[in-house]
Image (spheres, rainbow, N blue to C red):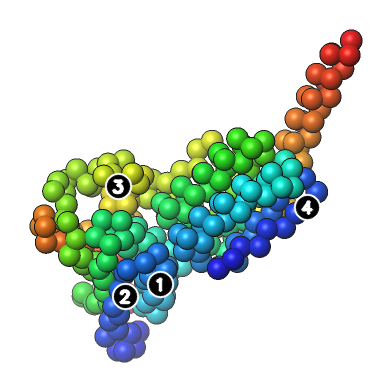
Amino acid sequence: MDVPILKQGHFLIASIQSALSDADLSQLREKLIERVGRFRARGVIVDVTALDVMDSFAVRTLRDIAHMARLRGAETVIVGIQPEVAFAMVQLGLTLKGISTALDLEEGLAFLNQHTQGRLDEKGERGRIERG
Amino acid sequence: MDASSVADQLRVEIASDVDVVQARQHGRELAAGAGFSTGDQTVIAAAISEIARNILMYAKRGEISLSVVANGDQQGVVIVARDQGPGIPDVSRALQDGYSTSGGLGLGLPGARRLMDDFDIASVVGQGTTVTMRKWRRLPS
């Protein structure tokens, strides 16, 4: 099952449409990390609204995506974890510690806009100091 | 609840990552048919996913059978996962959070146990492992 990855401005949006096998999840990870470089993306959103189960492999892969994207200079937000899925994750002992999450795509975009904007401002600030 | 759904029994071969998805989807459907809430369906599907994943990781192949049983005023989904893999030398240790011999997260067995109401493991080193787990729901009177 191929996961479509859309480019919107500086962000990549991976919108999972149906249940994914381990191989599908691994492929999504490779594709996203490659595209962060190809499109010079600042942010990645993984929309898991359609996932009816998140087991240990899915959570580990999402964590890997977030960490690898950060190493490549992009922030990741996981959006759309359903209430029952969240409940089962907590019971399983699965966490997304250190990974940003948002309720839905809209919130995820707002988060990334805010976050990457802050980073751009910082860079601008440094630039001015260097010139001074 | 009609009689046919009580008699439902389903076997799913586990030999690849696609089968893990199949098994948990069948489990969800069975639980839905037996009147479990969507929350419980998700819990059952997640437990099946972890147990099926363990079969793949340690035994390479095995099977999961799914059925619905009645017990007094309760109805249950029963999941039996069998493999002829290497077996588990130390079952109590395998049930501890974070213990893994495969490089996984070590949450599969203890996590599945927390999700389900009943959970038993029978394992013989060199012969295989059988995990039996159940989730119950009270029938409306």
Give the label on residue B12, or none.
Answer: 2
Q: Is residue B6 visible?
A: no
Real-space Cα distance between discs 4 and 3? 39 Å
Residue type marked 1? Gln
Q: Report helix, strand or loop for mark 3.
A: loop
Write down the chain letter for disc 4: A
Give the label on residue B102, or none.
Answer: 3
Instruction: Say if labels 2 and 3 share a chain.
Output: yes
Real-space Cα distance between discs 1 and 2? 8 Å
Vertical position of residue B33 compared to residue B130: above or below: below
Res A112 → quadrant: top right
Q: In x, y percent, where is residue A86?
A: 49, 52
- Decide which of tag 3 and tag 1 comes sooner along the chain: 1
Write down the chain letter for disc 3: B
- Decide which of tag 2 and tag 3 comes sooner along the chain: 2
Mark 3 closeness class: few <14, some 14–19, many ≥20 residues within 10 Å: few
Q: Quadrant of the C terminus of chain A?
A: top right
Write down the chain letter for disc 2: B
Find the residue positioned furthest to the top: A132
Looking at the image, how many numbered discs can be counted on the residues?
4
Q: In x, y percent, where is residue A122?
A: 78, 24
Res A41 → quadrant: top right
Q: In x, y percent, where is residue B70?
A: 24, 77
Q: Nearer the viewer, mark 4 or mark 3?
A: 3
Residue type marked 4? Gln
Is residue A63 or residue A30 the one in the foreground?
A: A30
Instruction: Say if labels 4 and 1 share a chain.
Output: no
